Image: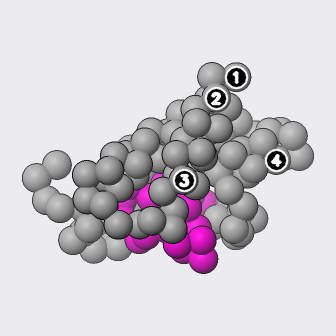
Amino acid sequence: MTRDTRQMSPADRLERLLELGGGACAWCGFDLSKPQARPTRDHIVPKIKGGPTRLENEVASCGSCNAKRGHDSPSQFIESSRRDRGLEPNAALVADQLDSLDAAIQREGGMRKIRDYVTREAKRVRALAED
């Protein structure tokens, strides 16, 4: 991508996230192109936990999943979605985004508050993707 993703507008980021996720909610697989869909950008590392608002820390999500997830970690929400809702989240996509965020942290520095969290969650989510 030629443009710095930190400079993308929210609408452009959502469009890119929809492309990355094949137009589906990362958490439930709902087709976000349907007329009744409410596509949103969900922060993988929640903002309240120090997650930045940037492409590498977001996935496309339906409004319902975004609200249900709240501040749960990605691995917790994947596990509870499988167990309680009978859904199969796109764990591979979430893991890829966490890996991209981890790479951005390594490259750019900063984000000390979330470094360990991102590394730990990337490993957990990658393991869930392989289940």
Q: Which residue is mark 4?
A: 80
Tag 3 secondary structure: helix
* Residue type of the residue flagged with mark 3: Asp
Q: Which residue is mark 1?
A: 131
Q: Earlier in the sequence, mark 4 or mark 3?
A: 4
Say if mark 2 contacts mark 4, CB within 8 Å. Answer: no
Q: Earlier in the sequence, mark 4 or mark 1?
A: 4
Left or right: where does residue 85 sit relative to residue 74? Answer: right
Say if mark 3 contacts mark 1, CB within 8 Å. Answer: no
Residue at figure coordinates x 51%, y 62% from the top left: 114
Vertical arrangement, residue 47 with respect to residue 102, above or below: below
Q: Residues within 10 Å of mark 4 (few under 14, many from 20)?
A: some
Residue at figure coordinates x 43%, y 42% from the top left: 99
Tag 4 secondary structure: helix
* Residue type of the residue flagged with mark 4: Ser
* Residue type of the residue flagged with mark 1: Asp
Vertical arrangement, residue 36 with respect to residue 87, above or below: below
Q: CA distance from mark 2 to mark 4?
A: 15 Å
Q: Earlier in the sequence, mark 2 or mark 4?
A: 4
Q: Quadrant of residue 35?
A: bottom right
Q: Quadrant of residue 131?
A: top right
Tag 1 secondary structure: loop
Out of 129 and 85, give the one closest to the viewer: 129
Left or right: where does residue 66 sit relative to residue 77? Answer: left
Q: Which residue is mark 2?
A: 127
